[in-house]
Amino acid sequence: MTKTTAVPSNVPNPVEQRVADLLARMTLTEKVGQMRQVNASEGHPPDYLAALIRAGSVGAVINQADVHVINELQRLAVEESRLGIPLLVGRDVIHGFRTIFPIPLGQAATWNPELVREGARVAALEAAAAGINWTFAPMIDIARDPRWGRIAESFGEDVFLTAALAVAMVEGLQGDDLSSPGSIAACAKHFAGYGAVESGCDYATTNIPENQLRNVYLPPFKAAVEVGVATLMTSFSDIDGVPGTANAFLLRQILRNEWGFPGVVVSDWDSVHQLQIHGLTENDGESAFEAVTAGVDMEMAGDVYANHLAALVESGRIAIGMIDAAVANVLRTKFQLGLFEHPYVEPAAHPSPGSEHALLAAKRMAAQSVVMLKNDSRTLPLSIQQLSSVAIIGPLADAPYEQLGTWIFDGDVALSVTPLEAIRTLLGDAVEVRHLRAMENSRSRETEAFNEAVEAAHACDVAILFLGEESILSGEAHSRADIHLPGDQAKLVQRIRETGTPVVAVIMAGRPLTLANIVDDVDALLFAWHPGTMAGPAIADLLFGRESPSGKLPVSFPRMVGQVPIYYSHKNSGKPPSPDNIVHIDDIDTFAEQTSVGMTSFHLDAGYTPLFAFGHGLSYAEFEYDHIRTGAHTVSIGDAVTISAELTNKSDIAADEVAQLYVRDLAGSVTRPIRQLAGFQRLRLEPGQTVTVAFRLHTDDLAFYGRDQNLAAEPGEFHAWIGGSSETELRTEFRIVASG
Ligand code: GLC
C-alpha cells in the first residue's frame, strides 16, 4: 500500500523536493487556485472555466465523467496555464462506476474485506478509464440511526467492522501504487461524527462527547489514515457547536498532530459558505478564515476561498505559510498520483466497463450481501424440480434502476439484471412464472391491483414478494421518520398470506426497516439492501439453492423506530434489563403499582432487544459452535491471548459462515460496551466439517480512550464470546494484568 507520508525523512524525498520547488515558483493567485475545486458538470469546458484554468485558478474539478471533456480540461491546465499543474478530477464513485456493487451497507453485510477490496478495485479501474483520478469514498461514518438516509452509504453501526472495510475500500481504490493506471485517490468521509445527527435527520446537529468521539466515531478514520488514504472530507454537520469544516480540534489536533495525516482535507459541497448559515460566521470572509485556519486545504464547489483567501493573506490575518502548507498537500497528492507524468487518459488502454470480471465480482458480492433473516419450515431453498408455478409479486421485482441504490451517478442501468429476469432465465420452461407488479411503486396506496396478485399467488406453488424502498428513499437528504415498508406493502403481504400459499419476501432497501408488522406473515425473509447491477442472478441463485445465504447484519433492526438508537455495543447502564425484570405493556394489570413493572432500562411497548440483532444471518447449512477456550486466563499488557472455538457444519451442504469474536471489558476508567466485535472470519465449511476458529487478541486491540482521553488497555476482567451473531452465549473469560 502506498503510504502517503509527507514528512521528509533524512533521505532526500523526490516528491517533497518537487513540491517545494513548484511551490516556490507559484504566485499567491496560483496557490489559492490549487485550493479550489470547481463544478465542471457542463459538457465542453465553458469559456469562464477555461479562462480560470488558464489563469491557474483551479486545482480540481468535480462531476465531469466524460473522458474527452476531462482530457480537454487537463490540456487547458497542463498546456495553457503558466505552471502546467494538472487537475484533480473528482467524482462520487461510492459503490461502483458503470458496474454497480451493493450499497456500502450491503457490502458490510458480506463481512468480506477481500470482496470489498475487489469491488473498489473494479470501480477504480472503470472510473480511471473515464479520466477520474479522485473519488469521495469510503464513507465511514458510524451509523446507528436507520432514520438517517445516509446509513445506506455507511458500513453500519460497528467500529471494528467499519474500520476493517474502510481499509479494504481504500486499498481497492488506491491500489498498491497511487501512480499506477487504474488507481485513484480515495477520500475518507465525513470527518467526523456525521452519523450522530439528531433524530436521524440529515445535516442536523450532532453532540458527541470527546470520549465517544474517540472511541466510536474516529477509529475508522484512523485506520484509513494508517493505510494511506490520500484525502479526507469534512462533515457538513455541527459538532458540539463547531461544524466539521471549521473544526480545528478534528482537523489540526486529531488529524495532523496526533495522526500525522499528510494528505488533503477537502470541504464538503459548499460547506465553507455554509459556516455562515450554521451561524458560526457573519460573512464569507470570516468563513474562509475559519476553514483555512481549521485546516481545510481545498474548497469543494464553492468560491469563498477564491474570493477571500488572498485578501486574508495580504491583510496579514493569515500567514502565507498556512496557504503554502495547504497547497503542498494538494501538490503532493498530484505528484503521488503521477499526474504530472500522465495527465491524460487513453480509454483504450483501460478495460471496458461492465466486463465479465466486473459483473462476476458484482454478482459474488451481491450474493454474499443478502441476509436471510427468517426461514421457517425450510421454505427456502426452492426446488425447481418440485415447483410447477411461481408468482413474482411487488414493485421491486423488475426495477433495474432502483436495485442499484443511491449514489450511482454513472451506473449503467442497461447492465442491470433484475430478479424477475434472472428467475425467468433460471427456470426456463420448467416452471411457470407469473409476474404481478401489484403496486406502481413502494409508496403506492392504490390496492386495486392486489386482487390479481392474490389470485396469482393462490394459483401458484409459492409467492415471492419483492418489496422495500426505491433508491430515492435513502441516501443524502433522504431521511425518514417512520421506517416501516412504505405505502401499503404490508397490506399486500397480508393479502398474499391469506391465500395460504408459502410466502417468501425479498426486501430491497437502503436502511434497516421496522419489519415487525410483516415478519409473521412471511415464511422466509431475505434482506437484500440495494444489491446493484447483478441483483437478479445473485438473488435467483440464493432462492433456488445454488448459493446459500451467508450475509450477516452490519446494523441492528429495531422492533419500533422509537427504540432508535438501538445497537448491540451499548453501555450496560446501572439498571440493565433482562427477560425476567421487564413487563410488556399489554401484560400490565389494570391497577398496576408504580414499581410493579420493573425498574430497568427498557421500553414498556418494545422491550430492549432489536427484532434482528447485529451479526444475525441464517444459512441453508446448520452451524454449531462449542468448546470455546482461551489460550491463557491472564495476559500481561503488551502480550496477546488466543480465543478459539470449534465450528461444525452439521448439514449436508457446503456453505460459508462468518464466525464472530466479541469481547467485554467488565470495568474500565470509563464504562465500556456490553459487547464489542473484536474479530471475524468468513469460513467455508464442507458438510460435516469441524474447524477450530482462533482469534489472536493483543492487549493493544483492547485499548480504549479512558477518562484521561489517553489510549490504553487497562488491567481487569474480560469476557469473550465466539458465535454466529452478537447474541451468541458461548463465552470464556480472561484477565489483563499489568505488565511485568
Ligand atoms: C455531497 C456529499 C458528499 C459528496 C459530495 C460530492 O453533498 O455530502 O458525500 O461526496 O457532496 O458530491
Image (spheres, rainbow, N blue to C red):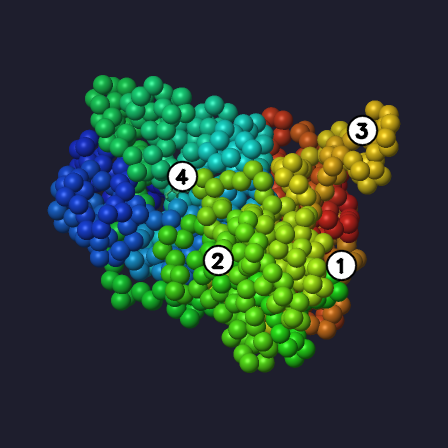
Q: Are marks 2 and 1 in contact (CB under 8 Å)?
A: no
The numbered mark, 1 or 3, whose residue comes first in the sequence reads 3
Image-quadrant location for residue 368: bottom right
> Pointer 4: what residue?
233
| In this rendering, the label closer to the viewer, 2 or 1 | 2
**Residue 617 rendering spot, x and y as whole percentages:** 66, 56
Tell me the tag on residue 34: none
Q: Is residue 9 visible?
A: yes
- Number of other residues with Cα within 10 Å of mark 2, as a class: few under 14, some 14 to 19, many 20 or more: many
Q: Which residue is mark 1?
A: 625
Which amino acid, by three-letter code, is at mark 4?
A: Met
Q: Secondary structure at mark 3?
A: loop
Is disc 4 surrounded by few (<14), some (14 to 19) or many (20+) residues within 10 Å? many
Going by the numbered disc 1, the residue's amino acid type is Tyr
Precedes in sequence: disc 2 or disc 3: 2
Q: Residue at x 37, y 29 (%)?
A: 274
Marks 2 and 3 sit apart, C-alpha to C-alpha, by 45 Å
Q: Which residue is mark 2?
A: 403
Q: From the Cβ of disc 4, is ligand 1 less than 8 Å away?
A: yes
Q: Nearer the viewer, mark 3 or mark 4?
A: 3
The residue carrying pointer 3 sits among few (fewer than 14), some (14 to 19) or many (20 or more) residues within 10 Å by Cα, namely few
- State which tag comes first along the sequence, 4 or 2: 4
The reply to whether the C-beta atoms of the residues labelled 4 and 1 are less than 8 Å apart is no
Label 2 CB-ligand 1 distance < 8 A: no
Mark 2 and mark 1: Cα distance apart in space: 35 Å
Amino acid type, callout 2: Gln
Q: Nearer the viewer, mark 4 or mark 2?
A: 2
Tell me the SS state at disc 2: helix
In space, the residues marked 4 and 2 are separated at their CA atoms by: 28 Å
